[in-house]
Amino acid sequence: MAGGHPGVQLGRHSEPPIHGPVATIVIPTFGRPQQLQACLAALAEQTLLEPWDVVVVDDGSPQSIEGLGPAWAGRLDLRVIRQDNAGPAAARNRGVQEARGTWIAFTDDDCRPEPQWLETLVRAARDQPGALVGGTTLNGLGSELLASTSQMIVDLVYAHFNADPDNAYFLASNNMLCPRQRFLCLSGFDRSFPRAGAEDRDFCDRWRIAGWPLIWRPDARVEHRHSQSLGQFIDLHIRYGRGAYLYQAKRKQRRSGTMRDDLGFHNSLPRRVHRHLAERKDPILAKLGLMAALALWQVTNAAGFFIEALSVAARRSSLPPFSRFISRRDSGSSPGS
């Protein structure tokens, strides 16, 4: 078992597996052993009949999960890789480096893929060779306001940016599949995103400017179970706002687009929220709670964006950086907002 060092940087000339599984599922994890067990239980029910395997990258969890592999022997072809905490981008890259599959599928430790999930993604990838394919995320904690709000944000993002499923714009890293060689060609996820937040947006942007297709297949579903306290919700969306600043700076640097290109989403948000809430059968108090949480999302997302802008300016002028107020590097996925 490998371990003890940060996720490796992917090389452009890594050799593909010669005789290996058709797909490898890569899961980054940090300190969520119970959620991870539930994720693996869901993967054990996958319907894909061709050989596939799973690589779990333990991103420096406080307690090692080395015994996980033998515990699933006979049910899953599973390997566990442990590394020093380096963030979700590095963890996923490390998983791909260790993978043997022709295709790489990504999900997270707090997700439970439906039985047909992997089979659906592989079928879509065969129908559109060379594509980055993604599916739909469902909220598995419908009774929790903040989990429901985060899911609603994802739904709004996908409705806007993936209006044409065969010409998608963004796919979240907790539900996607792509050819391993094309992933390596792009050098994987950008490790300069140290926390979960916009590294998947950046990856999709680089995939698009390479001229490769992005496909959204709504029937490839995973259930997301991410319980959040108010403090965790605020921290999460500040983090996403910080990631959004880095993402926009990188787009400007490589001339792949500007923030103005994405303003259509925010301009159409009131109309989309109104329509979305009108379609829900929730009581009026529940809808008011969602509206309040959505307003909090907008405020914290904007705050994170400006915190990162000030932090970058501080680093350039040798002032104390704002990043000291941000917590450790989480392994997870962003909603692309």
Image (cartoon, rainbow, N blue to C red):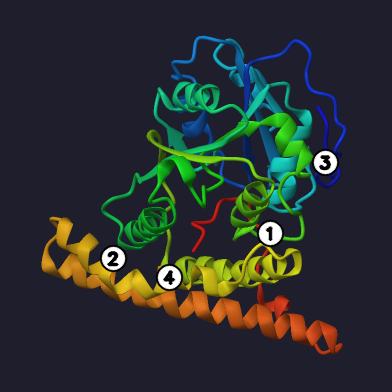
Mark 2 sits on what residue? Answer: 272
Give whichever of 252, 82 is nearer the camera. 252
In the image, 325: left or right of 272?
right
Looking at the rendered image, the quarter that the N terminus falls into is top right
Kind of residue at disc 4: Gly
Indicate which disc residue 264 carries: 4
Mark 3 sits on what residue? Answer: 10
* Vertical relation: 197 (above or below) 65: below
Q: Which of the two labelled residues, at mark 4 and mark 1, occupies the earlier sequence position?
A: 4
Residue neighbourhood size for the residue with mark 1, other residues' Cα within 10 Å, grouped as few (<14), some (14–19), many (≥20): some
Mark 1 sits on what residue? Answer: 329
* Vertical relation: 33 (above or below) 103: below
- Residue 114 screen position, x and y as percent: 39, 29
Q: CB under 8 Å between callouts 4 and 1?
A: no
Q: Which of the two labelled residues, at mark 4 and mark 2, occupies the earlier sequence position?
A: 4
Judged from the image, the secondary structure of the residue bearing numbered disc 1 is loop
